[in-house]
Image (cartoon, rainbow, N blue to C red):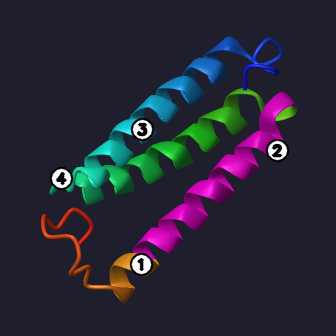
Amino acid sequence: MLQVEKTLPRAFVLMIFFWMCFSMFVQGAALEGRAYARKLEWLRFGITLALALVTYLLWPQALATAAFFIAGYAALSALAFAFEAHKHDNDRNAAGAFG
């Protein structure tokens, strides 16, 4: 990101930065076993899809490929998260953060 940020739109770089900060917060909540971590993770997927949509709508020529990769990442992550939650009843997580 640091190598290419000079060639990207500033608003896009800031959106990615704040998304990364929020993602770190979500991961921290999950690692701490917070009860609301699962809801935060779903919110993160929604924000990631919204980021992909905004990226595609605002910069279709320059960042269309990035938008598709972001959307694909969000969709695959959400599917994996849903599958994991469905497959396991998550007995090892006493706080129920992902249960």
**In the rendering, which numbered label is found on residue 11?**
none
Q: Does the CB distance between marks 3 and 4 fall below 8 Å?
A: no
State the image coordinates of residue 25 (x, y, percent, origin top left): 34, 37
Magenta stretch bounds: 62-82
State the image coordinates of residue 73 (x, y, percent, origin top left): 63, 56
Which quadrant holds residue 86? bottom left
Quick one: quadrant of the N terminus?
Answer: top right
Earlier in the chain: of badge 4 and badge 2, it is 4
Q: Amino acid at mark 1?
A: Glu
Q: CA distance from mark 4 to mark 2?
A: 35 Å
Q: Amino acid at mark 4?
A: Arg
Q: CA distance from mark 3 to mark 4?
A: 14 Å
Which residue is rendered at x = 23% and y = 76% of the image?
Answer: 92
Q: Nearer the viewer, mark 2 or mark 1?
A: 1
**In the rendering, which numbered label is found on residue 34?**
4
Q: Amino acid at mark 2?
A: Thr
